[in-house]
Amino acid sequence: MTADAAEIVRLAKKVEQATGPDRELDQAIWFALFGPDKDMHRIIARGSFNYTASLDAAMTLVPDGLWKRINVDPYGRANIRLGDACAVTAATPALALTAAALRARAAQHDNEVG
């Protein structure tokens, strides 16, 4: 992860406030978690990471070992059972899962550092 936990939480808050899929947020998530990539524009064009639009793409953000702890409902709520910080509500299930996954990553990052 290239961004610190605080930056990841700020990004999760932006996802929670989004009203629908957002390519700029998708790109910001990619940069925050994986850093710049020389093939970024080709990756975006192929739609390889539509985190804010696709539950499948959002699932790829869930930290290893936590996929069995996920609960997503059709009303835009998601919870990754890792504590209250990973329970979110957003406009769509994909946004909610993306935000919850980001919060879980930030929590894990804090645990690794602190």
Image: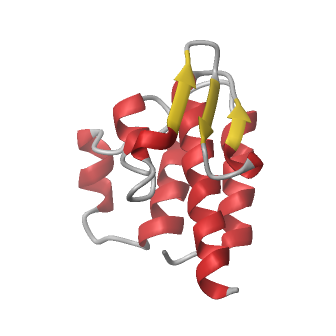
Residue 40: percent from left, percent from top: 32, 60
Q: Is residue 10 in view from this perspective?
A: yes
Colour mode?
secondary structure
Residue drawn at the location 50% of the way across and 41% of the way down: 69
**Where is residue 113, by image quadrant?**
bottom right
Residue drawn at the location 43% of the way across and 51% of the way down: 61
With 20 as the anchor, is 31 left or right in this view? Answer: left
Image quarter where the C terminus lies is: bottom right
Residue drawn at the location 71% of the way across and 36% of the way down: 88
With 108 as the anchor, is 1 left or right in this view? Answer: left
**Where is residue 81, by image quadrant?**
top right
Relative to 33, does residue 52 appear above or below in the rendering? above
Residue 94: percent from left, percent from top: 51, 29
Residue drawn at the location 25% of the way across and 64% of the way down: 39
Residue 77: percent from left, percent from top: 65, 25
Q: Is residue 4 in view from this perspective?
A: no
Q: Considering depth in this image, is 71 or 57 the residue closer to the camera?
A: 71
With 105 as the anchor, is 53 left or right in this view? Answer: left
Residue 26: percent from left, percent from top: 49, 47
With 64 as the anchor, is 73 left or right in this view? Answer: right
